[in-house]
Every structure is written in structure tokens, then in C-alpha cells.
Amino acid sequence: MKRFYSFLIVLALTLTAAWAQTNPNRILVHEASGNVQGFLVERVDSMSFAKVEGRVAADAEVLEFAAGSLSDTLWISITRTPDCEAFKLACIPANYMGHFPTDALLADYINQVGENYYYDDFDKAQLTGIDLADDADYVFATVGYDRYGIACGVAKSEFHTPRPAVLGTPQVECTVDAVDQTTITFSFKPNADTGGYAFCIYPKGQAESNFNSWGPMFGFATIGDMVRLWGLTQTGNYTYTYTDMNPGSDYELYIQPWDANGNNADYSVVSVSTQKMGGEGLAEMTIKVGEFGGSAEYGYYQEVTYTPNDQVSLHRDMVLEKKALDSGQWTEDSVANYLKGDNPYDPEWNQYGVDVARWGVDPATSYVAYSIAQNINGEWGPLASVEFTTPEAAPAAAPAVKGVAPKFPKRIMVGSGSINNAMPKFTTLPLKKGIQLTK
């Protein structure tokens, strides 16, 4: 009721605002899910308001699960509220639920992917036509429709599919042999029940976020599946050294063993930290503006070298258009605060040692290069800056080498606009067809 009432209010307000414009001929209704519903003004005959009492939803509970060769089966109890005329359903991997932070988004998703409307209650219905992964978390969800056909409330029931029987107790003993600022050496020793194993290292806490972000796209049902695809695979004793690690950083090594039949056992996690660099004194940076190059066809770049002193543990660098400072949109304080903030989605945000960066720039434009550093105790030093103006045009380009792609700028400069550090959105989820709910 509330959603339908709000919908009509928005429609009325939009129509009123539209008539205040010149020659309006469209009504646009912006839904909370992000969808936009459009109407031709000439085809709108009238508007009316309605009131639906109570919650409109189909409450569900997953009772049982059984795997099958042709189709898996769920046994489900579903009860509609008094004002729920019908419902649609969906079975969603739990790691995809982060894409639906609101009921409006989840309702819209189920409305789009649900294949059938159901008009009855079910005490113990069978849901077939699904193919679920082993040892994985899922959410069975419904959206209820009122007598006007409006998608209203959602209901969810979480469940976990069983793991196939594992032969023996596959395990891998792992030791940390050596650690310095940029390298970590591990040794692996599987037991006799282990048919094989895979291992993959992540910055602390990143395995879970990677799984939640990439799992639906790659079909990962568990973190173990992700480790098996992206990690290194071995069968016997093995020693491996990771290089180019970040100094003073925490890492987690995930190890996924499996039995002789290829069924995953429990994975294990080994935590390790690289040695810090720098000292306890003042962390200072030196900035030197270098080569300007590129072309109108492929873009121009400005090389900037950021050099830390011996007290620096890590530093963060950027280039900003000077007009953003002249206009007051940015200040040196806001630049410093921005650089001091974490940005987990930029792999080059933290720099260690000398950073030679190529920034994408425009010719004949003024910029300011900035850098700020921490010492080994996490204390920030002063903000370093150098102002420069790019030339009118790039120097003559070297002759093109056949089969060699042009080098694009290493980094993107921060312009005068706002900065978006949001995680990329993924909207594709493999859907199963032929889903049937029967009594």
C-alpha cells in the first residue's frame, strides 16, 4: 500500500512539474530501484489513488534440499499475506546479495528474473529446474504482488547446500620460511589423503571482498572455488616465493586441499606480515618533473618522479589541475586529507620507494604534483608539491615499431571534478531456466 501510494504521489508531482516546463509531452517516474517509468502525456487519461492495508509479501521457508543428476530440488513452505495476490521467486547465491542493499532493488531483480507468477500458498512445494553448487550459501527470495499488480514486499530464506563426502582428511602443512620487506617464502607439505591443493595470497581481508565482488561473475560458490581457479596448483611438497609484496603489510595465504575425487576439504589460512621499511624520523618527499610526451592520437603524458627519504615507509602521490586550486574547489588541506585516506580499489595508491609515474595530461595546462609520506610509526610528514605547466605540444614522436602497442599513461591524473572510488558494479548473474514450483 505504502509503495503504491508513494508511486502515485511521485507521479502527480512529476506531472505537475512537467506542465511548468515548455511543451511537456512525457511523464517520467523515477523509482527507488533506479528504474525510470515513462508515459506519453497524451495517453494519460486520468490518475487515481488507492489504499492497500497491511504488508504484501509471500513468506517463505526452505525445508529441505536434495542434489540430483538432472536437477536439484528444494522443498519450500510459502504463505502469502492476506493482501498478496501472487508472487515471483528467485534462488540467489548469498555472495550476490550485496548487490541488493535495499528491498526495492531486490524486488526489482526478482520481478525481472522470476519466470512465473504463483497464486497459491504451498505447505511443502518442490522447486526443480535449479542447479546449485555444493557447500554453498544461497538465499531463496520472493516478491509479493498486490491486486494492482505492483511488486511490493520481499521475503527471504537462507540455506546452505551440503558438501560431498570427502575421502579421508586432506590437509596441507604450510610453513613460512623467510620474510623480508618485499618477499615471502612458503613451504607446503600435503598429507597422504590430499589429491591436490591450490594456494593464493591476498592482502588481509581482501579474499572475502574479492569473493563477494567476483564470485557471481565467475561462478564461485565458495572461497575455495576462487582459490582453485586463481591460485597455484600442486600435488606434492613444494616451496614458493612471492615477490613484489608491499613492505609493512599484512597478508593471508589461502590453501584449498581436495581429496582423490576432487572434492574440496576445509581450506586453511596462514597470516603473515612483511617487514616495514623506513625509520622513526620525519618522512619527506622530493618531487621532480620529467619528460612530457605522447600524441593527440593516443593522449599526452607527464612523467613525475617521487623520491622518499630514508625515513619513509609508504607515500601517496597525485597530480591536480591548478585551476581546481585557483577556484577553491581544492585546497592544500583537502589534498593532504584526500591522500591520507585509504583507497583499497586503487592498486597503486600506496607507493614504496621511488615512484616514477606517467600521468595523463593535456598540453599547455598548469598542474601541481603532490606527495605525502608516512614513517615507520604511521606518522605523516609534510605535504610536498611542485607546480608545472605542460608544453604547447609533445616533442616529435619516435618512429612507430610494427607490432608494438603505444604506451599509455601509467596513472590517471585527478582533474577538477569529483573523485569516484566506488567499487565497479556487476549486474550479470547466470540464470537458470525452466524453474518450476509444484505441490
Image (cartoon, rainbow, N blue to C red):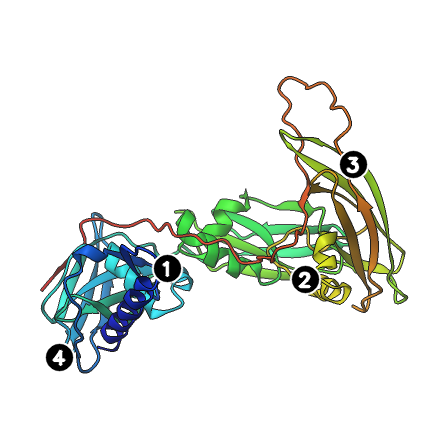
Q: Given the current orientation, which residue lies at the most extreme bottom position?
A: 53
Q: Which residue is mark 1?
A: 135
Front residue of 36/63: it is 36
Q: Which residue is mark 4?
A: 82
Q: Residue at x 64, y 51 (%)?
A: 347
Looking at the image, residue 409 sits to the left or right of residue 376; the answer is left
Gap between marks 3 and 1 measured at Cα: 60 Å
Q: Mark 1 or 2 closer to N-term?
A: 1
Q: Residue at x 78, y 57 (%)?
A: 315
Gap between marks 2 and 4 measured at Cα: 55 Å
- Dot 1 alpha-carbon crowd within 10 angstroms: few under 14, some 14 to 19, many 20 or more: some
Quick check: can you spot residue 114? no
Front residue of 23/54: it is 23
Quick check: can you spot residue 179? yes
Q: Disc 2 or disc 4, which is closer to the eye?
A: 2
Q: Is residue 219 above or below residue 151?
A: above
The C terminus, quarter of image: bottom left
Q: Secondary structure at mark 4?
A: loop
Q: Mark 3 or 4 closer to N-term?
A: 4
Q: Which residue is mark 2?
A: 329
Q: Secondary structure at mark 3?
A: loop
The N terminus, quarter of image: bottom left
Q: Mark 2 or 3 closer to N-term?
A: 2
Gap between marks 3 and 4 measured at Cα: 72 Å
The label shown at residue 391 is: 3
Q: Mark 1 or 4 closer to N-term?
A: 4
Looking at the image, residue 59 sits to the left or right of residue 406; the answer is left
Q: Disc 1 or disc 4, which is closer to the eye?
A: 4
Q: Secondary structure at mark 1?
A: loop
